[in-house]
Each structure stands twice: as structure tokens, then as C-alpha cells.
Image (cartoon, rainbow, N blue to C red):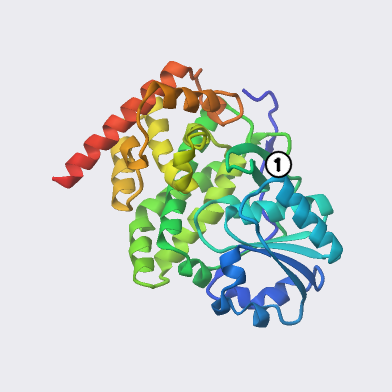
Amino acid sequence: MITTRSRAFGSPFRYIQGPDELDHLAAHAAPYGRRIFLLLDPVLLDDPDLKLEARLAGLDPTLARFSGECTEAEVARVEALAKDHRADIIAGLGGGKTLDTAKMAAARLGTALFIIPSSASTDAPTSAMSVLYTEEGAHLRSVLHQRGADLVLVDSRLIARAPLRLFVAGLGDALSTWFEARANARSDTANYIGSGYRRCQAGLALARHCYEILLADGLRAKLALASGAVTEAVENVIEANILLSGLGFENAGCAAAHALPTGLHEIPALNRFYHGELVAFGVVFQLVLENAPQAELTEVLDFLTEVDLPVSLGQLGLEPTPANFQVITRRVLDGRSGMEAEPFLVTEDLVIAALLAADALGRRHLEIQAR
């Protein structure tokens, strides 16, 4: 339990979302300078349809290819390249790990930071946080920065070009926001603003509204994107996946739903799954752990199955063996996974019991749906 009565709310300086917003990059950059260092996912750097040359007109750009993992070595490499360019702005264009690397380099150099997500797969774009990994892809630690991005620029037409699986993974990540915010409120755990404060009611309201948007528009948005359409439902869910989820988790905190994936990532075979896919099962796990009402569990299971997110260990290809559970629980209970935010003491026995029970509920739900 946090001891201060002070509350805090953090956010990016600007968030702008809409179709073809990337066309206005030079105008958005004008207050900060012309020299922009742009770190890109490799697939985007080689994509002629992105029309980067035209979109960078009026700027003095340097482009660099992201290595694929947010590691200490990659951050140091990007920092050195941006310093050589004397960058006014460091911009990350791509997925969560690309963006986290750009955040760290900008924080170390003190430059302006632009975040341009290429998918709506996580809530990383709006947070003042980077997650570092080992060279092998295992979770190393989270780094909190002093401030958020100067601009989060979300081009919804660019988001729509990403694989649909990424968008759906974002639904899983965003789904956790309200349940984890609620757990942190119950335990009165510090949020991720600075050294940690109590959450503002605004953070809780955003987390709750994120969940409401997913239930209302999640399936419709998935079906629209599958048809190549950017509808109002798609725009709503992009905002929920990126902005509302990002502000919700940073200002209220993570809990068991995100703690579980830190343990799942310790099993190399599970690293083929996206973060949000693991978090989706993490939500079921958390609700079982907390003994949530059956009606709430059913609502969540209905949503996850209709958008094709995993609700069982079998869907993840994870055998419920003592050896696997030992690997998972060791990481989940190490005091830095988020599990400590739950409003009760979580033990190894409770984690294993919740895993088994969540798996059983998920399997039963799938059986019912298949009839």
C-alpha cells in the first residue's frame, strides 16, 4: 500500500489520430526543429507504399533500421547515431520495441520524441516507459522516463495496413486495463508516474471506458479491418488500444494480467505469441485468481472467443507440467512483475491453482461455443 495521499496523472504532450496524419509530419515537427532521426521497423524502411520521401519533405532526416530487439546494445547504437546527426527530434516508427528504443535514446539525449505506431497492438506508444529485453528476447526490466512523448502521431490508415493479428493482439492488451486498474485501486498501489503516486479518478475512468469501447466496438472493428475498411468503430478501438489503455495502465498500474506474461515469456516456445495474446489469457487468469463474479468471467470469455484470442493453455501450446509452472511462478512472483499490485498475498500455490482453473474455464467455454 502506498503511503502518500498525493495523486498524479501523466500523458504525452500531444496525441493526434486520423487517416493520413503522417502526411503532416513536417508541420508537427516545425516547433521542434528540422533535424529528425527516424528509427523504423525493417519492413517499413523497405516499403515503397509508405512514401517516406514525400512525407519527410521539408525536414533534414536520417533513417535507421531497428535491429528487432529493445536491448541495451540497440539503445546505445541508436543513441550514437542520433547524436551524430545532431537530431532535434528522435522519432520511432513501428512496433512497441522500436518505439521503446526510440524513447530510451531520446531520454538519454534530451531530444524531442515523436512516437508513430505502425499497429494498434499494444498501449506502449503513449506511456513514458520502455521495456528492455535480453538478446534472446527474455524480459529484462522496465525503465520509467521522466516525461512522455512530445507527440504520439497515429495514422489510422497506416494502422489498417498492419496484419490483422496485431490489431487483435491489441484488443487483448487493452482488455486488461480496467481489471488491472481496479486491482491497483483495491490495493492502493502506486502508479507509474515518477516515483509513484495514487491514481487520479481520471485514470480509472479512462481504464473503465477502454473496456466499454472494446465490448461495444471490438468485434465490429476487427471485421471492418478484415474487409479493408476504416470505420468509426475502427477509429474508436485504435484509440482504446493505444490511448485509453496506455493512459489507463500508466496512471493506474498493471497487475496479474500482465504479470503472467512475464512468466510465460520465460518459456522460449511462447515467444512466438504477441504480447497482447498472452495478456488475453492473463485477464482470464487474473479474474480467476481474484474469484471475480461468473457473469464478469463469462463476458470476458465471450469477448475473447469472438475475436479469436486465447482462453486456454492448449491454445498457447503450453503443457501444464510442474516444470513449466515452476519456470512461470518463479518469474511471476519475483516482486517486479506486477503481481504485487493484487490486493492480497499471491503465493506459488495460488498462481498454479489459478492457471489450472483458468485453463479449465477456457476449455469449457470453447466446448460450449463449438456446439
Q: Left or right: 45 with respect to 229?
A: right
**In this rendering, would 182 be left or right of 292?**
right
Left or right of 194, for residue 183: left
Number of other residues with Cα within 10 Å of mark 1, as a class: few under 14, some 14 to 19, many 20 or more? some
Disc 1 residue type (three-letter):
Leu
Looking at the image, which residue is at 66% across and 51% down?
A: 100
Element at label 1: strand
x, y percentage for residue 332? 52, 27
User: Would you place residue 351 above or below residue 94 in this image?
Assistant: above
Which residue, as the protein is rendered here, is positioned at the far left? 371
Residue 243 vs residue 289, the one in the foreground: 289
146 vs 28: above or below: above
Question: In this view of the protein, which residue sits in the foreground, 339 or 162?
Answer: 162
Picture coordinates of residue 81, whole percent (x, y): 80, 61
Residue 262, above or below 357: below
Q: Residue at x 55, y 64 (%)?
A: 118
Q: Is residue 154 visible?
A: no
Q: Residue at x 37, y 41 (%)?
A: 316
Can you see residue 226? Answer: yes
Q: Nearer the viewer, residue 193 or 144?
A: 144
Location of the C terminus by quadrant is: top left
- Residue at figure coordinates x 70%, y 41% from the top left: 144
Residue that mark 1 sits on? 144
